[in-house]
Amino acid sequence: MSEGLIHSMTPTTPLAEGEHVITSFHPDRAAYRRDHAWLAAGAMALGMAILWAIGNPHVWTGAVGGLAAIAVRGFYVASDELKARWDLTDRRLLGPQTRVVRLSEIKTVRGLGSAVQVITATGDKHLIKYQADRAGTEARIRAAAGL
Protein backbone atom coordinates (compact mmCIF):
# COMPACT_ATOMS: atom_id res chain seq x y z
CA MET A 1 0.00 0.00 0.00
CA SER A 2 1.38 3.40 -0.86
CA GLU A 3 2.28 5.87 1.88
CA GLY A 4 -0.46 8.28 0.73
CA LEU A 5 -3.20 5.68 1.17
CA ILE A 6 -2.03 4.76 4.67
CA HIS A 7 -2.47 8.32 5.91
CA SER A 8 -5.52 9.26 3.84
CA MET A 9 -8.45 10.72 5.77
CA THR A 10 -10.85 9.72 3.01
CA PRO A 11 -12.04 6.24 2.06
CA THR A 12 -9.47 4.32 0.01
CA THR A 13 -11.53 1.14 -0.37
CA PRO A 14 -12.68 0.79 -3.97
CA LEU A 15 -16.38 0.52 -4.70
CA ALA A 16 -17.66 -2.91 -5.69
CA GLU A 17 -19.13 -3.41 -9.13
CA GLY A 18 -22.55 -1.75 -9.23
CA GLU A 19 -22.10 -0.09 -5.84
CA HIS A 20 -22.69 3.67 -5.65
CA VAL A 21 -22.24 6.37 -3.03
CA ILE A 22 -25.51 7.67 -1.60
CA THR A 23 -24.03 10.47 0.51
CA SER A 24 -20.81 11.56 2.17
CA PHE A 25 -20.35 12.79 5.73
CA HIS A 26 -17.82 15.59 6.21
CA PRO A 27 -16.78 17.17 9.53
CA ASP A 28 -18.08 20.65 10.31
CA ARG A 29 -15.58 23.31 11.39
CA ALA A 30 -18.11 24.99 13.73
CA ALA A 31 -18.86 21.66 15.46
CA TYR A 32 -15.11 21.05 15.77
CA ARG A 33 -14.60 24.42 17.45
CA ARG A 34 -17.63 24.00 19.71
CA ASP A 35 -16.47 20.56 20.87
CA HIS A 36 -13.00 21.91 21.60
CA ALA A 37 -14.48 24.84 23.55
CA TRP A 38 -16.30 22.31 25.77
CA LEU A 39 -13.11 20.27 26.14
CA ALA A 40 -11.20 23.41 27.11
CA ALA A 41 -13.81 24.36 29.72
CA GLY A 42 -13.60 20.87 31.21
CA ALA A 43 -9.79 20.86 31.19
CA MET A 44 -9.70 24.28 32.81
CA ALA A 45 -12.10 23.23 35.59
CA LEU A 46 -10.25 19.96 36.16
CA GLY A 47 -6.87 21.68 36.29
CA MET A 48 -8.14 24.21 38.81
CA ALA A 49 -9.83 21.51 40.92
CA ILE A 50 -6.64 19.46 41.09
CA LEU A 51 -4.54 22.45 42.11
CA TRP A 52 -7.13 23.46 44.72
CA ALA A 53 -7.25 19.87 46.09
CA ILE A 54 -3.49 19.71 46.56
CA GLY A 55 -3.45 23.11 48.23
CA ASN A 56 -1.69 25.11 45.54
CA PRO A 57 -2.23 28.85 46.11
CA HIS A 58 -2.16 29.56 42.36
CA VAL A 59 -5.34 27.74 41.36
CA TRP A 60 -5.83 30.03 38.33
CA THR A 61 -2.82 28.42 36.60
CA GLY A 62 -4.92 25.27 36.17
CA ALA A 63 -7.26 27.23 33.91
CA VAL A 64 -4.36 28.57 31.86
CA GLY A 65 -2.83 25.11 31.52
CA GLY A 66 -6.11 23.44 30.58
CA LEU A 67 -6.91 26.08 27.97
CA ALA A 68 -3.40 25.94 26.51
CA ALA A 69 -3.42 22.13 26.29
CA ILE A 70 -6.73 21.96 24.42
CA ALA A 71 -5.89 24.94 22.19
CA VAL A 72 -2.60 23.34 21.10
CA ARG A 73 -4.31 19.99 20.54
CA GLY A 74 -7.15 21.61 18.58
CA PHE A 75 -4.75 23.52 16.35
CA TYR A 76 -2.45 20.54 15.83
CA VAL A 77 -5.06 17.93 14.83
CA ALA A 78 -7.50 20.20 12.96
CA SER A 79 -5.78 19.68 9.62
CA ASP A 80 -6.41 15.91 9.79
CA GLU A 81 -9.75 15.81 11.59
CA LEU A 82 -11.39 18.30 9.24
CA LYS A 83 -10.36 16.27 6.18
CA ALA A 84 -11.98 13.04 7.37
CA ARG A 85 -14.78 11.76 5.16
CA TRP A 86 -17.18 8.83 5.44
CA ASP A 87 -19.09 7.59 2.40
CA LEU A 88 -22.44 5.83 2.71
CA THR A 89 -23.06 3.52 -0.23
CA ASP A 90 -26.01 1.29 -1.02
CA ARG A 91 -24.09 -1.62 0.60
CA ARG A 92 -21.47 -0.28 3.01
CA LEU A 93 -20.24 2.58 5.14
CA LEU A 94 -16.71 3.46 4.01
CA GLY A 95 -14.49 5.40 6.38
CA PRO A 96 -11.07 7.00 6.31
CA GLN A 97 -8.31 4.76 5.01
CA THR A 98 -9.64 1.21 4.69
CA ARG A 99 -12.44 1.26 7.28
CA VAL A 100 -15.42 -0.67 5.94
CA VAL A 101 -18.70 -1.56 7.63
CA ARG A 102 -21.30 -3.59 5.76
CA LEU A 103 -24.76 -2.10 6.30
CA SER A 104 -26.08 -5.56 7.24
CA GLU A 105 -23.53 -5.72 10.10
CA ILE A 106 -24.61 -2.45 11.76
CA LYS A 107 -26.32 -3.15 15.09
CA THR A 108 -26.48 0.29 16.74
CA VAL A 109 -26.24 3.92 15.60
CA ARG A 110 -26.19 6.57 18.31
CA GLY A 111 -25.16 10.14 18.87
CA LEU A 112 -22.35 11.27 21.16
CA GLY A 113 -22.15 15.05 21.22
CA SER A 114 -21.55 16.09 17.62
CA ALA A 115 -20.39 12.59 16.66
CA VAL A 116 -22.23 9.50 15.47
CA GLN A 117 -21.12 6.13 16.80
CA VAL A 118 -21.72 3.07 14.63
CA ILE A 119 -21.48 -0.30 16.37
CA THR A 120 -21.40 -3.57 14.45
CA ALA A 121 -22.82 -6.93 15.49
CA THR A 122 -19.27 -8.08 16.32
CA GLY A 123 -18.74 -5.07 18.61
CA ASP A 124 -16.52 -2.95 16.34
CA LYS A 125 -17.06 0.75 16.98
CA HIS A 126 -16.62 3.57 14.48
CA LEU A 127 -16.96 7.28 15.18
CA ILE A 128 -18.06 9.82 12.58
CA LYS A 129 -16.93 13.01 14.29
CA TYR A 130 -17.93 16.69 14.20
CA GLN A 131 -21.24 16.46 12.35
CA ALA A 132 -23.21 19.69 11.87
CA ASP A 133 -26.46 17.70 11.74
CA ARG A 134 -25.81 14.69 13.95
CA ALA A 135 -29.46 13.61 13.98
CA GLY A 136 -29.60 13.73 10.18
CA THR A 137 -26.42 11.65 9.88
CA GLU A 138 -27.85 9.08 12.30
CA ALA A 139 -31.15 8.95 10.37
CA ARG A 140 -29.44 8.42 7.00
CA ILE A 141 -27.29 5.57 8.32
CA ARG A 142 -30.25 3.94 10.12
CA ALA A 143 -32.40 4.16 7.00
CA ALA A 144 -29.67 2.66 4.79
CA ALA A 145 -29.03 -0.15 7.31
CA GLY A 146 -32.74 -0.84 7.77
CA LEU A 147 -32.71 -0.14 11.53
Image: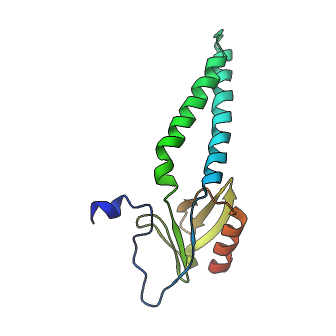
Q: In which quarter of the image is residue 89?
A: bottom right
Q: Where is residue 136 in the image (x, y as percent from the top left)?
A: 70, 69
Identified at 39% across, 70% down, the residue is 12
Front residue of 61/138: it is: 61
Which residue lies at the image location 41% right of the left edge and 64% below the top edge? 97
Image vertical order of residue 37 relative to residue 8, above or below: above
Q: Where is residue 45 in the image (x, y as percent from the top left)?
A: 69, 28
Q: In which quarter of the image is residue 99?
A: bottom left
Direction from residue 95 to residue 145 in the image, left or right: right
Q: Please, which residue is most extreme toward the right here?
A: 135
Residue 24 % position (x, y) = 56, 72
Q: Nearer the viewer, residue 108 or 91?
A: 91
- Residue pushed farthest left? 2
Q: Residue at x 61, y 56 (%)?
A: 130
Q: Is residue 77 above or below residue 63?
A: below
Count of labels shown? 0
Looking at the figure, which quarter contains the C terminus?
bottom right
